[in-house]
Amino acid sequence: MEFASDVVSIEKNGGVGTLWLDRPEKYNAMNESFWLAIPEALKALESDKEINAIIVAGRGKHFCVGLDLVDSGMVSHQSVAGESEAVANIKQLQGTTRFQEAISSLAKCPVPVIAVIHGHCLGAGIDMVTSCDIRIASACSNFSVRETRIGLVADVGTLQRLPSILNAGHVAELAYSAKDINAVRAEKIGLVNDVYESQEAAYAAGMALANEIAANPPMAVRGTKFMLQQSETLTTEQSLLMNGMFTLMTSLRSNDLQESMKAFAEKRPPKYTGT
């Protein structure tokens, strides 16, 4: 599990990996190095077959204050002399696409990803947590689709993923107004699963949940996430057919299922291998 970055770090605790946003002096504002490091950190965690759940959390005072507008590598693109506006725009779009793909790597991660949020979660921070499967927050957290307030249309995932988390009215309110909401409101509307009194308590709860997930048979956990992902774009009938075929080919034929049955019969804890 090799990975090195000045702005993102990773660690392993048993079957749980943590991806730390590690730019505390800038409140984890995302510069280009920051968001490009996220997929690489995930790849390093995913390469460890013992890891069956991942937590995303932030070092320092805030989870993430959004895009670093001074040092993002996106909004400050400079045209080359003699280059047309069309070429400059294409380059800008390519940069945005790379940013989108970096954030989407969280959604595409084959194991469940839990965001543990404290302090500010603004703009690109919302892009990031809506790409995660589960969101847990501390009482000090606040949230904002901040792009609208500064004259931008959010374009890195919030407007695509938030509607599958919240109802249309709440999405519209947050996206149009760019207002801040606190953790109580975030929990009430379903943006976060639970709220805890402190950053430490939220992280401990996230770790406890991640360990619950990681204790399950790895093939079943990954297969469940795969089916949830696929079902987003399938009809119910198509999803049911795919689910039946997928289960037939994978978990029904797995060593872990046999181990689960054997352990139950022998009244002992199972020892899963992910095979």
Image (cartoon, rainbow, N blue to C red):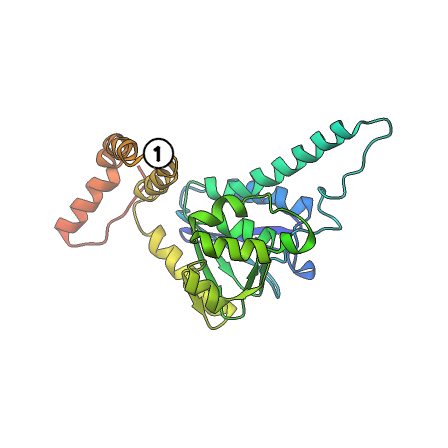
Point out the residue furthest to the bottom here: 197
Q: Residue 91 is drawn in which quadrant?
A: top right
- What number of labels is visible? 1
* CA neighbours of label 1 inside 10 A, class few (<14), some (14 to 19), many (20+): few
Give the SS element for disc 1: loop
Q: Indicate the quadrant containing the C terminus: top left, top right, bottom left or bottom right.
A: top left
Front residue of this view, candidates 270 and 126:
126
Residue 225 lies left or right of residue 61; in this view the side is left
Point out the residue furthest to the left here: 265
Vertical comparison of 197 with 69: above or below: below
Query: Residue 148: horizontal and vertical position, in percent?
Result: 63, 53
Task: Mark yes or no: residue 156 visible.
Answer: yes
Residue 25 lies left or right of residue 226; in this view the side is right
Query: Residue 273: horizontal and vertical position, in percent?
Result: 31, 42
The residue at the point 54 percent across, 70 percent down is: 140
Query: Residue 89: horizontal and vertical position, in percent?
Result: 72, 32
Front residue of this view, candidates 183 and 261:
183
The residue at the point 66 percent across, 34 percent down is: 93
Point out the residue furthest to the right here: 81
The residue at the point 15 percent across, 54 percent down is: 267
Which amino acid does the dot numbered 1 rest on?
Answer: Leu
Which residue is identified by label 1? 234
The residue at the point 22 percent across, 41 percent down is: 257
Vertical comparison of 230 with 182: above or below: above
